[in-house]
Image (cartoon, helix red, strand yellow):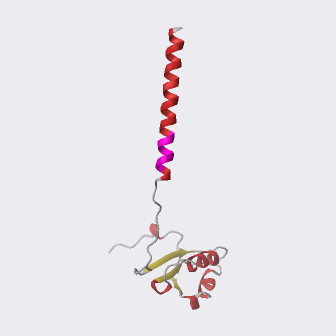
């Protein structure tokens, strides 16, 4: 009987302790202060660089999402780097030039699948 009584007291104590911890967490979550943006607009220039290769199917959505940001458009620069695409990726990016999207095309003589693995001749 004593063992049953000790186990019963221990489980009751742990249950009460668990309820106290849960209540403390709930109070803490309700007292959190959420981030609010400042009243003024941003003053920092931002450049967004996106590397793309054969992204014809996704590139329009990416550009549209970047252009939909509510940061000051005069302080935002969006640059796409076309990494030897063999599809219409560069053409699609160029169609957004009137909206301020810039394109840089990599045009080495021989495109490699991995430029990290490129070996240079030692002199």
Visible in this render: residue 99?
yes
User: Where is residue 62 drawn, in percent x and y?
Assistant: 60, 75
**For the N terminus, which image quadrant?**
top right
Q: Main secondary structure of the magenta part?
A: helix
Q: Is residue 55 left or right of residue 17?
A: right
Q: Work out whether residue 85 or residue 91 is closer to the camera in this orientation and state it.
A: 91
Residue at x 40%, y 81% (from the top left corner): 43
User: Where is residue 13 drawn, in percent x and y?
Assistant: 48, 26
Residue furthest to the right in view is 57
Depicted 106 relative to depicted 112: above or below:
below
Q: Work out whether residue 122 or residue 10 is closer to the camera in this orientation and state it.
A: 10
Q: Give residue 61's quadrant in the image.
A: bottom right
Range of magenta residues: 22-28
Depicted 9 relative to depicted 57: above or below:
above
26 falls in the magenta region: yes
**For the C terminus, which image quadrant?**
bottom left
Residue furthest to the bottom in view is 98
Visible in this render: residue 54?
no
Residue at x 46%, y 55% (from the top left corner): 32
Residue furthest to the left in view is 123
User: Where is residue 5 drawn, in percent x and y?
Assistant: 52, 14
**How many numbered tags mark residues here?**
0
Depicted 87 relative to depicted 97: above or below:
above
User: Where is residue 20 drawn, in percent x and y?
Assistant: 48, 36
Residue at x 65%, y 79% (from the top left corner): 87
71 falls in the magenta region: no
């Amino acid at each position: 009987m004593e063992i049953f009584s000790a186990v019963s007291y221990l489980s009751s104590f742990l249950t009460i302790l668990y309820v106290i911890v849960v209540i403390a967490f709930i109070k803490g979550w309700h007292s959190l202060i959420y981030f609010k943006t400042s009243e003024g607009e941003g003053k920092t220039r931002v450049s967004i660089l996106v590397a793309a290769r054969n992204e014809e199917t996704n590139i329009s959505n990416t550009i549209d999402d970047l252009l939909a940001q509510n940061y000051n458009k005069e302080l935002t620069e969006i640059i796409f780097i076309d990494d030897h695409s063999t599809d219409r990726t560069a053409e699609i990016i160029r169609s957004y030039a009137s909206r301020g999207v810039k394109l840089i095309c990599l045009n080495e003589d021989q495109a490699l699948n991995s430029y990290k693995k490129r070996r240079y001749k030692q002199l």
